[in-house]
Amino acid sequence: MKEELVKIAEQGRTLLLKIAIFLIGITVLGLCLIWLPWQAMILEDMYPEFVFLKLPLLIGIYLTTIPFFFALYKGIKLLSYIDKNQAFSERSVKSLRSIKVCAITISLLYVLGMMILISVNAGNPGILLLGLVITFASIVIAVFSAVLQMLLKSGMDLKAENDLMV
């Protein structure tokens, strides 16, 4: 009985993080399917001179969801490796590397989008501020993933060195 409780506790240590990732994914999916098209129609009515940007902006935002959802998938995979006591494995390092690349991709896409908006004089301060927040959040995630990747790689090297000594 005690062993079963310990096993359940070990598997549940990342359950809260998996639930958080799932909820973030569902929220972003809902925003993309319901809120974003509705908001685009409202902005189209408010700023008819920028109606030509509606479709390119929607496509650009939807393009950024591809690396976003891939990073969420890799985050869940990383948590499953941790649950299986395989945190110090090459697969974990690859997951962190993928998360880092996805975060950098999102940042670059948003910077490109903001530059396009500014170049056509459609740089609404609210929209640019939101783009900056998303860009900086992605950069923070990329840096955090790179640091964790480096620490994990160092831990793997140290573990391999200790295994050779025994």
Image: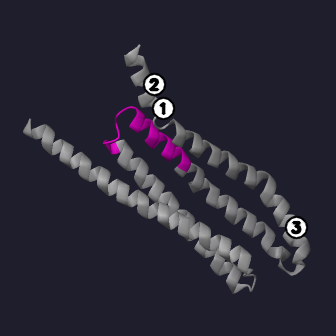
In the rendered view of the protein, which quadrant contains the C terminus?
Answer: top left
Task: Give the numbered dot on residue 97.
Answer: none
Tell me which label, 3 or 1, sits earlier in the chain.
1
Disc 2 or disc 3, which is closer to the eye?
2
- 16 sits left or right of 39 in the view: left
- Residue at the spot of label 1: 12
- Please identify the dominant SS of the magenta region: helix
In the image, residue 134 above or below residue 153: below
State the separation of the CA atoms marked 1 and 2: 6 Å
> In the rendering, which numbered label is found on residue 42?
3
Q: Front-most of 88 and 10?
A: 10
Name the residue tied to disc 2.
8
Tell me if mark 3 has few (under 14), some (14-19) or many (20+) residues whose alpha carbon lies within 10 angstroms of its own. few
- The span picked out in magenta is 72-90
Q: Secondary structure at mark 2?
A: helix
Position of residue 46 measured from the top left corner of the image (x, y, whole percent): 89, 75
Q: Are marks 1 and 2 in contact (CB under 8 Å)?
A: yes
Closest to the observer: 161 or 59?
161
Q: CA distance from mark 2 to mark 3?
A: 49 Å
Q: Position of residue 59 (x, y in %)?
A: 72, 63
Q: What is the crowding at mark 1: few (fewer than 14 residues within 10 Å), some, or many (at least 20)?
A: few
Relative height, residue 52 to residue 61 (above, below): below
Is residue 47 rendered to the left or right of residue 56?
A: right
Instruction: Confirm whether the magenta stretch covers residue 136.
Output: no
